Amino acid sequence: MKIKMMAGALLAALGLFASCSKTGKDVQDPNQEGSTYVGITLSMGTNDLRANEDDNYSKKGTWNGKDEIKTIDVYVVDVASGVVSTGFYNKNNFTITQTDGAPSITIIPKTAIRTTPGQKKVYALVNASADITRVLADANATEFEKAYNKTAQEFTIASVATNDGTKDAIMASNAKECTLTVADGVTAAEALATASPKNRAKVEMKRVVARVLVTTKEETYQVMYSDGITKMGTVKKISYAGAQGEKKFFIGQQIANGQIITPAFDYVPTKTEDIWGATGKASYDYSDLKAHTFDHNPRMATKMSAGSAAATADQIGAEALKKSLFMFENSHKYQSNPANTDVNRYDGKFRRGNTAYVLVRALFVPDKDAFADNTGTTYKEGDDFYLGANNKFYSKRENVTDPTKGGIKNQKFRHYLKGKVLYYAFVNPDRAPGTLDAPVFRNNIYRIHITGFKTIGTNWNPLYPEDPKHPDTPTPDNPDPKPDDDPDNPNPFNPEDPNTPKETWMSVEMSVLAWTVHSYDIELSL
């Protein structure tokens, strides 16, 4: 098999097309295999399979994308004989039609694949890495279908999706099964004919990742006390990172009983410790939280005045191309009654600890008159502060419980390190703010538009797979850990909690893009 792979790579480097068959053992002579030819047309970007899946929720429209197509791998599977015929293309071997405003990108290889007649299944990969193709390289028909459709693969997001600010290079796979009855005796020219081609397989493709964009109506926001008159402080320097997209993915999108299935579909945290244990760590990706922190390489939210009602799919797509994040799919069983809004009657499987979210980090600057210890005039933006249970601020911990400094004896408090505050937004809520189901699917753009902040956020992130009382290392791995001097404060919420918050912390508009684009507005709170 090494000889076959090396030969394919050499031919691709020369701008040629490689075609061969494999049974899982010996490779047949590419020049002798088969008695007929197959042509392949790929359509990339369509989300047309189901009204109750990819189209949910807050659908805005579609955006064609700006894709760099580097390679295409085609697999023609004959289950009866166990033979897999393969074709490997580089960008010189196909014609791309990528028209602005079109619903999808059309890719037509210029060289046909030699194969045998009969019933076939056709699979394709666009921009697959060497690691991905290696998974499929040696498989016979049965093994191939399992590897492509049923086996959860674990690769980093960066290995399947990259962006340089002007274009994407994203892996795409079959959106659904493609079957073809191959006639014998068809020539390469007949398979490639523009008009009435013979043995032509049409494969619908989807990018294997979702995309998330966070925008803001303003760059700074005022937060008021509950009376709506008294200023509490200012939110500024708004950045974001994504978490709880799944760590693994199926190469081909999986559907069962009308619902898209993901590798961690059945995982439901039943207690807080679940997400801090091995299952939570194995199921979900938290790397973006560490790659883009409050202090290091923050991914700043994009100021975009147009909310979900005014912004077009093209506008959202163009902004997402400049700056956004990629994430693998994440889904669970929906509630049986989609119209239900009562969290007490919710019977779905989405929880805070298994649902994809965006962690919004921001700098909070307390109003000078909101300090109970009269230190507001000397407080420096970005310094630590303490928020007492009385909803007043203190510049020093000891002042929180000192009545002579405006404190209250034994008063509980939250310690905000460097003025950092945290807010959460689900990537694809069924409704905001009363979210219950919130699935994330490949080939969709999810735009979260922040319209305001209702109150100060929390000071640490409990939705990270690390026990705050017993971190894995002396230095917490969680980039937003619970402060050491904040022992008595309970979690702002627990991983096993339903997604509907008790309070609304942030106002958000949501939009989701082929790319299907979604967009929603949100006002952030706890």
Image: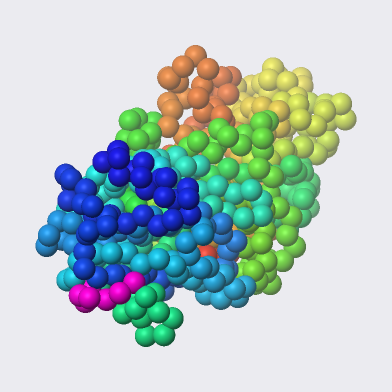
Check the image and report above or below for 192 versus 20: below
| Chain part drawn in magenta | 181-188
| Residue 225, x across and y down, in percent | 72, 47
Q: Residue at x 27, y 57 (%)?
A: 31
Q: Residue at x 58, y 24 (%)?
A: 483
Name the residue: 77% across, 49% down: 220
Question: Could you say which is closer to the camera, residue 517 or residue 367?
Answer: 517
Residue 314's quadrant in the figure? bottom right
Task: Give the main secondary structure of the magenta stretch.
Answer: loop
Q: Position of residue 353 (x, y in %)?
A: 41, 42
Residue 162 vertical placement versus 78 (above, below): above
Q: Is residue 428 above or below residue 158?
A: below
Q: Identify which residue, 10 or 198, lies in the foreground.
A: 10
* Colour treatment of the image: rainbow
Near-viewer residue (328 or 522)? 328
- Report the side of 514 relative to 375 (left or right): left
**Residue 221 in magenta stretch:** no
Q: Please count the marks in the image.
A: 0
Q: Is residue 100 visible?
A: yes
Q: Position of residue 167 (x, y in %)?
A: 62, 55
Q: Residue furthest front?
A: 31
